[in-house]
Image (spheres, rainbow, N blue to C red):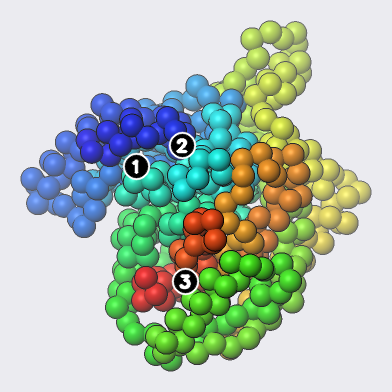
Amino acid sequence: QDYLGRIAAHNPDINAFITVDPDRTLADARAADALRAAGNAGPLTGVPIAHKDIFCAEGWLTTCGSKMLANFVSPYDAHVISQFKAAGMPTLGKTNMDEFAMGSSNETSYFGPVKNPWDTARVPGGSSGGSAACVAAGLAPAATGTDTGGSIRQPAALCGITGLKPTYGVVSRYGMIAFASSLDQGGPMARTAEDCALLLNVMAGFDRRDSTSLERDKEDYGRDLAKPLAGLRIGLPREFFGAGLTGDTAKAVQAAIEQFRTLGATTVEVSLPNSGLSVAAYYVIAPAEASSNLSRFDGVRYGYRTPDYGDLTDMYEKSRAEGFGAEVKRRILIGTYVLSHGYYDAYYIQAQKLRRLIAQDFAEAYRQCDVILGPTAPTTAFKLGEKADDPVQMYLSDIYTIAVNLAGLPGMSLPCGFDSQGLPIGMQLIGDYFAEARMLNVAHQYQ
Ligand code: GLN
């Protein structure tokens, strides 16, 4: 009730939620009480959580930030939602996001932009901007996000919270509306690494309904939180500390590196020579997969249908023309182009080859270090509208995060200070496959 009160008071200013439904939240809270009464409480029973509106939740409006799904009430729960329900965590609401998770500023949402709680003239980052903003503003203690090219880590950085993208395949994508299926991964967003560990314990695990879900033993992601950092080898990629990284972000990350040395870690320079090509490779692969995934929105089975049409083809065309926003259409057009006969080899196959080279760069780096450290984003929160008309500038917001998705590695962002305007700065930790517990340990020791 306290969080619902804060949402009622402050959400009108920041627009972090698309849907709140206090009756449902309180019903979930009573279910948590019942779980506790039956002696089945876990560490998070009764703790409320907000869910990115990309996760299907039974009986909840599930819009994915789009007019296409503006009236879609999900008939089923995503795997992640059912895991949090089983843990007794009441749903506080569904959070705002860039349309179909395409964006880095939350400005492509059909439901209007989210405002950064640190300065409401600025963006919260994206696409999980509503989740980041609601945690930063104290409207929720935790939230879910998804990360295809940085959408957990970049908004976490711009809002001064902690967010983790797990190794691809650790969290089931069942019921998570697909953007680019080979890159999409759900993860926790919260105030601290310790909170993220508790949340990941609930989210992670094999699910046969996702064919890329990994069958691994359950682990406690918080098991190493208290471990000292003596002997830790931190890799600093030369390419992340070049000309693009300036000013307050560079200073804050350098200060964090000093602190890690004080905590007993050593640093080693590593190289990710192909990382400069990751944005280019991503903007072939992600649109290609999106153009295929979004073909399901045809006005026939569910979602928006134009009220006024002639034959079936006209109905498809008008429904898609009216239901999708400009950025989504741009991605569908790029994706269709790079997959088309005659261009497939020149673009799509080349991008897939780059993807492999980028993954090999990381494998090489992990011969010399345990975790990689760098900035999460090149700048702190920028002004609303500043990059909205310049897609290439917007795409460069994810220059440090995208390679991680292409390689399928785990990555997290945690706060590491403020710029001269008082805006939060995030640093990124990148782990080897399945090194989530180690990353959380490193982050917790810093925090
Ligand atoms: N900003 C990137 C994009 O627009 C990444 C988004 C994401 O991770 N969902 O595609």
Does any portion of residue 296 appear in the rendered image? yes
Q: Quadrant of the C terminus?
A: bottom left
Q: Which residue is mark 3?
A: 434
The secondary element bearing badge 3 is classed as loop
Q: State the SS at label 1.
A: loop
User: Do labels 2 and 1 touch, CB within 8 Å?
Assistant: yes
Q: Earlier in the sequence, mark 1 or mark 3?
A: 1
Q: Amino acid at mark 1?
A: Leu
The disc placed on residue 14 is 2
Which residue appears at 38% of the width and 45% of the height? 137
Q: Mark on residue 139?
A: 1
In the rendered structure, the answer to whether residue 157 lies left or right of residue 363 reads: left
Give percent across and percent down for residue 282.
Answer: 71, 56
Residue 337 numbered mark, or none = none
Q: Residue at x 64, y 78 (%)?
A: 237
Q: Is residue 165 visible?
A: no
- Image: 362 above or below 296: below
